[in-house]
Each structure stands twice: as C-alpha cells, then as structure tokens.
Image: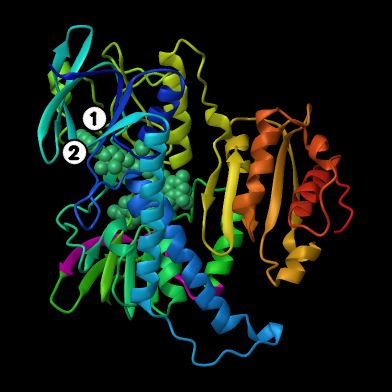
C-alpha cells in the first residue's frame, strides 16, 4: 500500500519547504518532494533561491564588494592594500559552502518538524480515493497519496529563441554564478534584477560589462526618480547599460559570443564578448509534473492558474510561488506557502500583495514597497512626496557611502503612506520599517514622530517622512 499523507508538497524551494513546515506545525502528516541534486547527486532542497538564486548571488555580491572596497575605498580610510588579488575558485567554493549550509538547514528543519522528505521528481498519476496519487521518481520509484497537494515547482530562466543556454559561453543565472574566471568582456541581455546584480559582481572583479536592454526606460517598475539616481551611480562605476536595443543574431563561437544588435539610434552594432548572460525573465516550471493527469489548468504562459487564495481549478490542489501569477520573489512564495497551509487547516491565511517589498542588491542597493510616483499619477491619486538624501545623513558620511535617497509618497488628504522608495547604502534592511508601517496603514507623520537611533541610516527614513510635510531637520 502506498504511503498516505494529509498534505504533499511538490517542490522544496522557499514556497514549498515553508508550506511543508507550516502544514506540519498545524498538525498534518506532511511530505515534501524535491528533485534538486547537489554536485554529488544528493538532495539539495531550497530550490532556485538556495541553489542558483537569492543565496549564491548574495554570497558573490558580498565577496566582490569586499574586493571592490579593498581596491577603491580602503585608501580613504588610511589603509593601504597593494597587490589585492581575487581567487575566483575560492570565492566560488565559499559560495558553494554557503549554499550547502542552507540545503542542510532545510533538511534539519524537515526532521525537526517531522516532514517526510522525498528526493526525486513528483508527478501526478491521477485521482485516488479521498485525494491524489503522486509518483516519486528518485533513486527508486514509489507512489504516495495525499488528501491535499501544494505545487511549488518554481521557474526556469527564459532563453532567447535560437540561443540555448550551454552554461559555458551562453549563461543563465546558473552558469553566471559559477564562472571559473573573470571574463575580460561580459555581455548581458536584460537590465532587470539579475542583469544588474550579476553585472555588478563581475564588473567589480574586473570584467568589462555591457548590458543590453530592450526597453527604452531603465528599471521601468522602479520609481523614476530612484531609477534615475541608481543609473547615475551605475554609469559612474563603468557598468555600461544600453537601453532601447534590438538584439539580432547571436553567434556562440569557439572563442566567445558575438551579439549583433541595433542600438537606440538605429545603428547596427557588433558586440564581442567572452561570455553572455541572458537575463530576460523567468518562466513557470511544470516540467515532468504531468498536470494533465488531474486536469490542472495552465495559462498561455505555462503558469498554473490560481485564484486569490492559491486554489487551482482542481479541488484540494493548490499552487504557490514562481509557478503562479505575481512577482517572482522568494518571500512572496513563502508568504503564499504559509497562507495555503493555514487555509488547509481552516484558518484565514492572508497575503497582502500591496506590501511585498522589492530589493535589488546592487551598490547602491535599490528597495521599495507600495506604489511609485508614476503609478499614483496614472491612478489619479493626489499625493505628497518627501525625499531625504543620504548625503545629509551622518552615519552615511561615516560609512563613506552617501549615494542615494529615501522617498516617501503619502496620500494628500489622509497622509497614509502609499509607497516608500530607496536607493543607497543598506536599504535592503531599511525597507522593512516601511513595510511594517504600510502593513499597519501608518501615516508619514507616524514615522516622522518615532524616535530613530542616532547616528543611523534609518534617520534618513524619518527625515524623508518629515519631508512629506516639508519639515526636515537636517536638510
Ligand atoms: P523554486 O525556488 O524555483 O523551487 C522549486 C523547486 O521545485 C526546485 O527545487 C525544483 O527542483 C523543484 N521541482 C520542480 N519540479 C519538481 C517536480 N516535478 N518534482 C520535484 N521537485 C520539483 N528572490 C528574492 O526574493 N530575493 C532575491 O534576492 C532573489 N535573488 C534571485 C537571484 C537569482 C539569480 C534568481 C534566478 C532568482 C532570485 N530570486 C530572488 C527569485 C527567487 O529565487 C524565486 O522567486 C524563488 O526561488 C521562488 O520560489 P519557489 O519555491 O516558487 O520555486
Ligand atoms: P527581469 O524581469 O527583472 O528583467 C528582465 C529584463 O530583460 C527586462 O528589463 C526586460 O525588458 C528585458 N528583456 C526582455 N526581453 C528582452 C530582449 N529580447 N532583449 C533585451 N532585453 C530584454 O528578469 P530577470 O532579471 O531575468 O530576473 C527574473 C526574476 O527573478 C526577477 O523578475 C525577480 O522576480 C527574480 N529576481 C529577484 C532578485 C531580487 O529580489 N533581488 C534578484 C534576481 C532575480
């Protein structure tokens, strides 16, 4: 007889493993199936985020930032560092170790919470009495049954038609995170989140980086004022970003890659590079899941169709994270995973899509929550704006990093915070205050009246909130 579970989660990324843990906490018999393999063929739960996404990219951003500081910023502190070298193999090995610690951490959490882990590919076999049968193909094959199924199979990098990833010269996020040496010339297609983060890593290590972006605007989803400030900083660093290009033929040759494109002026350009990273978005992944076996509905882009509660068209089958609509972010996947586990338990799980923060971990970092100024204009909302530059913040001066600003957007009548946008040092951490404030529907004045530690970067948040009412104290 097949093993029976109350809840089976397919996919062990941030959406899946968190859903499994929450469901187990709520008293269900839970299994989680994940097929990711480490270099030795063993289990590596954590999905894209842990293995080839959030975690390894932040490890390389940290290493490359240290290198950049040693080369360019130590001197101003009176520290002389000559002959600074980067051992790329060691940097990658450190990153791999960080990844492994996270994989092991998830396996430990499964044990702690009594989640049964299956290493292999899960696919629907069909309906079973009171639920569904799922085949698990790993080292061995077995079938398990579940009353409720949560699908969290994530996403894969989108390829350019006619240019498959070989992960040698033409790289997805996977290859971009394990280059063996710093390429002399690196080309990237797509100046979105991955393009900017990966471009920053390899530029800091000495690569000549060109990013080709199809759209005429830089970071269209980001508040225009913030995007403009970030672009200024990237230009100064020597990150070459060409907007409004049309990518043509790409030749993957023995010595490297040639990208033919038309620039914004309509001129034909030939770009030779040692490596090419393609970062033009991601596609929902249902490969091998066999959704047809239960009549699961997918949309025209291959994403699983769900309602606002992550219910699919099949009773008792839910889907969360990158495989469904909404932003492809680890914390969004986690929130949906928790909410679904709670709904299965009859509770009222809730995800507030208006307060999901975004962070781009470049230098300066970019972070935001809520609506941008351009969105508020388009929505016809009357608003007040307040900004405060890090240039006027004592802690930023002491850190030696005064790029950027904090910007508040508040309702013109009620003063409720509608959006907070930041570019500057450590704003990935500062944005949490804005998320909490918006979650509690705070006004700009609420933040302005709260005592913030001095000297701290968070004082820029308070000052930007004061600026909404035109009463900054330090600018
Ligand atoms: P995934 O993490 O993709 O996990 C899906 C898992 O399911 C995988 O382990 C996969 O092997 C497994 N699977 C798929 N099909 C099956 C099957 N049939 N049977 C068994 N297992 C299966 N987001 C952030 O919030 N912050 C960041 O800093 C950030 N950085 C990123 C950097 C990069 C380079 C990339 C590519 C992404 C980054 N993201 C970041 C996005 C983030 O990684 C995703 O939003 C997140 O991983 C989605 O989680 P998920 O659980 O939906 O899917
Ligand atoms: P993205 O959607 O952020 O950016 C893709 C960019 O490629 C866009 O600017 C788009 O206009 C451009 N583009 C698309 N087709 C093109 C073409 N043919 N030619 C030229 N440009 C083209 O996608 P990206 O960077 O691949 O990242 C995927 C997702 O992963 C992100 O949207 C995000 O959800 C997640 N992610 C999150 C991170 C974070 O939270 N810090 C870090 C990295 C990824």
Judging depth in this view, the residue of 280 and 59 nearest the camera is: 59
Residue topped by disc 2: 120
SS for dot 2? loop
Query: Does 373 sit left or right of 175 as displayed?
Result: right
Question: Looking at the picture, how far across and down is residue 426, in whole percent?
Answer: 63, 58
Q: Is residue 348 above or below residue 90?
A: above
Q: Determine whether the beta carbon of the residue marked 1 sits less than 8 angstroms from the nearest atom of ligand 2.
A: no
Q: Quadrant of residue 247?
A: bottom left
Q: Is residue 20 above or below residue 171?
A: above
Please say whether residue 383 is one of the residues in the magenta stretch: no
Residue drawn where x is 26% and y is 76% of the image: 274
Residue drawn where x is 13% and y is 17% of the image: 126
Residue that sits furthest to the bottom in the current view: 82
Q: How is the image coloured?
A: rainbow
Q: Is residue 378 above or below residue 160?
A: above
Residue that sits furthest to the left in the current view: 141
Question: Looking at the picture, how far across and down is residue 269, in whole percent?
Answer: 28, 73
Residue drawn where x is 33% and y is 54% of the image: 52
Residue that sits furthest to the top in the current view: 129
Q: Tell me the magenta residue range.
A: 236-251
Residue topped by disc 1: 300
Q: Determine whether the beta carbon of the residue marked 2 sits less than 8 angstroms from the nearest atom of ligand 1.
A: yes
Residue drawn where x is 70% and y is 28% of the image: 440
User: Earlier along the polypeptide chain: callout 2 or callout 1?
Assistant: 2
- Per the model, the C-alpha gap separating discs 2 and 1 is 27 Å
For ligand 1, give the image quadrant: top left
Q: Looking at the image, is mark 2 or mark 1 nearer the viewer?
A: 2
Does any portion of residue 30 appear in the rendered image?
yes
Mark 1 crowdedness (10 Å alpha carbons): few <14, some 14-19, many ≥20: few
Query: Does 285 sit left or right of 437 as displayed?
Result: left
SS for dot 1? loop
């Amino acid at each position: 007889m097949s093993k029976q579970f109350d809840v089976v989660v397919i996919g062990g990324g941030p959406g899946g493993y968190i859903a499994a843990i929450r469901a187990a906490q709520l008293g269900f018999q839970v299994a989680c199936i994940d097929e990711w393999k480490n270099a030795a063929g063993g289990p590596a739960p954590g999905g894209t985020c842990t293995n080839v996404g959030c975690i390894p990219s932040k490890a390389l951003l940290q290493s490359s930032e240290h290198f950049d500081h040693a080369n360019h910023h130590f001197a101003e502190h009176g520290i002389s560092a000559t002959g600074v070298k980067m051992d790329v193999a060691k940097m990658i090995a450190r990153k791999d170790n960080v990844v492994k610690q996270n994989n092991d951490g998830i396996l430990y959490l499964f044990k702690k919470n009594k989640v049964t882990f299956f290493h292999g590919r899960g696919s629907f076999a069909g309906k079973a009495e009171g639920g569904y049968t799922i085949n698990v193909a790993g080292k061995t094959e077995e079938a398990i049954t579940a009353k409720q199924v949560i699908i969290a199979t994530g996403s894969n990098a989108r390829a350019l038609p006619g240019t498959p990833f070989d992960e040698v010269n033409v790289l997805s996020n996977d290859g971009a995170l394990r280059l063996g040496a710093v390429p002399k010339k690196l080309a990237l297609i797509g100046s979105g989140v991955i393009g900017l983060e990966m471009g920053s890593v390899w530029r800091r290590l000495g690569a000549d980086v060109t990013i080709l972006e199809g759209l005429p605007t830089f970071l269209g989803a980001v508040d225009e004022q913030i995007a403009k400030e970030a672009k200024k900083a990237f230009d100064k660093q020597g990150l070459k970003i060409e907007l409004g290009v049309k990518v043509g033929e790409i030749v993957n040759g023995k010595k490297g890659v040639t990208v033919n494109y038309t620039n914004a002026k309509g001129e034909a350009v030939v770009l030779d590079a040692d490596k090419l990273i393609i970062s033009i978005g991601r596609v929902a992944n249902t490969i091998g899941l066999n959704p047809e076996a239960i009549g699961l509905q997918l949309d025209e882009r291959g994403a699983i169709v769900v309602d606002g509660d992550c219910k699919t068209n099949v009773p008792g089958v839910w889907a969360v994270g990158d495989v469904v609509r909404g932003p492809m972010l680890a914390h969004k996947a986690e929130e949906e995973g928790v909410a679904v586990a709670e709904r299965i338990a009859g509770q009222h799980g809730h995800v507030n899509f208006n307060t999901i923060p975004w962070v781009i971990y470049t230098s300066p970092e970019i972070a935001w929550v809520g609506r941008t100024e351009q969105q508020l204009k388009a929505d016809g909302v009357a608003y007040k704006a307040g900004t405060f530059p890090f240039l006027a913040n004592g802690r930023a001066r002491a850190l030696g990093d005064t790029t950027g600003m904090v910007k508040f957007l508040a309702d013109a009548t009620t003063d409720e915070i509608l959006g907070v946008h930041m570019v500057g040092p450590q704003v990935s951490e500062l944005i949490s205050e804005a998320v909490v404030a918006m979650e509690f529907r705070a006004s700009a004045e609420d933040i302005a009246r709260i005592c913030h530690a001095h000297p701290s970067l968070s004082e820029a948040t308070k000052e930007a909130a004061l600026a909404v009412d035109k009463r900054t104290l330090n600018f």
